[in-house]
C-alpha cells in the first residue's frame, strides 16, 4: 500500500512505484573500483523464476474492469481503482460504484488514466492524487499530468492540477506512471521517456524519463537536486529512466521498477540527482535485435539493483510486510504484463536470491498493493482486482 493508517496516533508509515552518443567518460573512468563496487555495485545475474512450492489461490474483489491500472485504500479499507479508459471505481463491501469527477484523459496508446494514491493524511483532508495522460497545453497530443482532488461520497471535487509534463506529443508510449509518498511531506511520481529516448531522459531541462518530487500541495521542495540550475525542470529528482511503472517507499528509499527495451527491465533505488543511464547504458537491445549501446555501466550512471533479461514488462511494485504470508514476508512483488504472473523476489543485500511466479497465467498484472488489512491485492487486466489468498485460508 502507499501508506498505512496506524491507530491511535496518526503515525504514518509509507509504502505504498539508441543509437545515442556513446558515453565519452567511460574511457577515462578509473575511480577506486572497490569503493565503486560497494557504493554502486554492478548487479548480479538473477536466478530463474520458478513456480512456488504451493500454488496460490485468489478471489476476485472487484470484477469487470478491463485495464485496472492503479488502486489504493481509504482509511475505511474500501478501495479506489482507476481504469485506463478514464473511469474510477470505489469498491466498498463488495460493491463497485463509479466515481464522478474523474479527470479528462488523453486516450492514446499506453496513455489514459494511470495511478491513484490516497494522501497519507486523507482522514483530515480527503485528498487523492492521480496521474493521467492529459492533452492540456498548446501542442497536439498529450503528456503525463498529476492532479489531486477531494474524494467524498463517491465524488471527486476541488480538482487541482499539480504538474503537467511538456511538450505534448502524439506518441503513445511511455507515460509512466506511479505515485508514492515519503514520510516527510513529499510525493514522488514517474514519467516515462514518451518515446523520445534520445531527447528526453538525459536532459534535465525536459520532461520525460524522470522521477519527480513535489510537496503535497504541488510546490517544488527547495532541496530538490536541480533547484537553481539553469532551465532545469526543478521538480526532477532523478533522471535517465525509461518507463517506470512500479514504485514503492521502502525503508526511507524510493524504489522503482521500469520497463527496459528488449531485455533490461530494471529495479532502481532512486537517489536525488542521480542518472540511471537510459539510453546511454542498458542491459537491453532494440525490439528488432539491433544494438542500442554496448555499454552496460559507466561512471556517470547509477547501476540498477537488478535487471531482467528477458524482459518481464514490470508494472506495479510492493513490499510484503504483513504476517499473512510468512513465506513472502520482507520480499517484493512485481507484476509481469508480458508473462502474466505476479513475480515474487527475495532480495538479500543487493542480490536477488529467489524469483517465483505467483498466480501464473492469470493475466497481465498491472498493479499490486498490500492492503491495510495485510492482504495482498493484485490488479489484473481482463479481470479486475483480486485478493491473493494465504495458504492457510484456502
Ligand atoms: Ca538503467
Image: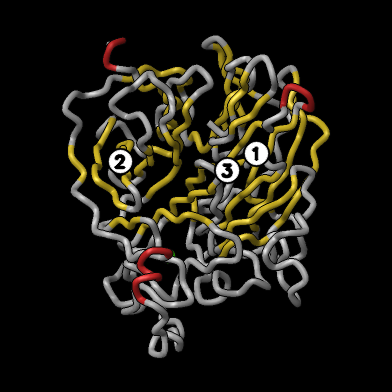
Q: Position of residue 15 (x, y in %)?
A: 54, 36
Instruction: Report the mark closest to the observer, 3 or 2.
Output: 2
Q: Is mark 3 in CB contact (under 8 Å) with mark 2? A: no
Instruction: Using the image as rendered, state which of residue 356 and residue 271 is in the foreground.
Output: 271
Q: Residue at x 35, y 67 (%)?
A: 37
Q: Which residue is mark 3?
A: 114
Per the rendering, the mark at residue 346 is 2
The local crowd at label 1, few if under 14, some if 14 to 19, many if 20 or more residues have their Cα within 10 Å, is some
* Residue at mark 1: 183
What is the spatial separation of the Cα atoms under label 3 and label 2, in whole angstroms?
28 Å
Which quarter of the figure is the C terminus placed in?
top left
Ligand 1's quadrant is bottom left
Q: SS at mark 3?
A: strand
Ligand 1 within 8 Å of disc 3? The answer is: no
C-alpha gap between disc 1 and disc 2: 25 Å
Q: Going from the N terminus, do you reach mark 3 or mark 1 first?
A: 3
Q: Please tell me whether mark 2 sits on a helix, a strand or a loop.
A: strand
Of the numbered discs 1 and 2, the one sitting upstream in the chain is 1
Label 3 neighbour load within 10 Å: few <14, some 14-19, many 20+:
many
Looking at the image, which residue is at 46% across and 24% down? Answer: 64
Quadrant of res 337: top left
Q: Position of residue 247 (x, y in %)?
A: 51, 45
Disc 1 and disc 2 in contact, CB within 8 angstroms: no
For mark 2, does the 10 Å Cα neighbourhood hold few (<14), some (14 to 19), or many (20 or more) residues? some
Amino acid at each position: 500500500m502507499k501508506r498505512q493508517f496506524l491507530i491511535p496516533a496518526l503515525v504514518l508509515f509509507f509504502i505504498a512505484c539508441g543509437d545515442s552518443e556513446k558515453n565519452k567518460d567511460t574511457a577515462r573512468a578509473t575511480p577506486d573500483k572497490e569503493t565503486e563496487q560497494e557504493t554502486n555495485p554492478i548487479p548480479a545475474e538473477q536466478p530463474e523464476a520458478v513456480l512456488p512450492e504451493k500454488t496460490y489461490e485468489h478471489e476476485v474483489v472487484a470484477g469487470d474492469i478491463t485495464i485496472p491500472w492503479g488502486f489504493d485504500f481509504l482509511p475505511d479499507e474500501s478501495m479506489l481503482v482507476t481504469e485506463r479508459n478514464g473511469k474510477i471505481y470505489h469498491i466498498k463491501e463488495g460493491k463497485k460504484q463509479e466515481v464522478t469527477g474523474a479527470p479528462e484523459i488523453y486516450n492514446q496508446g499506453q496513455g489514459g488514466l494511470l495511478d491513484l494514491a490516497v494522501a497519507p493524511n486523507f482522514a483530515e483532508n480527503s485528498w487523492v492524487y492521480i496521474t493521467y495522460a492529459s492533452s492540456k497545453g498548446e501542442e497536439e497530443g498529450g503528456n503525463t499530468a498529476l492532479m489531486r482532488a477531494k474524494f467524498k461520497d463517491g465524488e471527486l471535487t476541488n480538482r487541482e492540477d499539480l504538474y503537467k509534463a511538456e511538450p505534448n506529443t502524439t506518441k503513445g508510449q511511455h507515460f509512466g506512471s506511479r505515485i508514492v509518498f515519503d514520510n516527510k511531506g513529499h510525493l514522488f511520481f514517474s514519467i516515462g521517456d514518451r518515446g523520445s529516448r534520445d531527447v528526453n531522459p538525459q536532459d534535465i531541462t525536459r520532461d520525460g524519463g524522470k522521477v519527480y518530487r513535489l510537496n503535497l500541495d504541488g510546490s517544488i521542495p527547495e532541496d530538490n537536486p536541480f533547484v537553481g540550475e539553469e532551465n532545469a525542470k526543478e521538480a526532477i529528482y532523478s533522471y535517465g529512466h525509461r518507463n517506470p511503472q512500479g514504485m514503492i517507499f521502502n525503508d526511507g528509499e524510493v524504489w522503482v521498477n521500469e520497463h527496459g527495451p528488449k531485455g533490461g527491465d530494471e529495479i532502481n533505488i532512486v537517489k536525488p540527482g542521480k542518472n540511471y543511464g537510459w539510453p546511454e547504458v542498458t542491459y537491453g537491445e532494440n525490439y528488432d535485435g539491433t544494438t542500442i549501446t554496448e555499454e552496460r555501466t559507466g561512471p556517470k550512471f547509477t547501476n540498477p539493483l537488478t535487471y531482467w533479461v528477458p524482459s518481464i514488462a514490470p508494472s506495479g511494485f510492493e513490499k510484503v510486510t504483513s504476517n499473512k504470508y510468512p513465506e513472502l514476508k520482507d520480499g517484493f512483488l512485481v507484476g509481469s504484463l508480458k508473462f502474466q504472473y505476479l513475480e515474487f523476489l527475495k532480495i538479500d543485500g543487493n542480490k536477488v536470491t529467489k524469483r517465483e511466479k505467483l498466480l501464473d497465467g492469470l493475466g497481465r498484472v498491472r498493479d499490486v498493493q498490500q492492503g491495510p488489512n495485510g492482504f495482498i491485492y493484485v490488479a489484473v487486466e481482463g479481470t479486475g482486482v483480486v485478493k491473493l489468498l494465504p495458504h492457510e485460508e484456502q
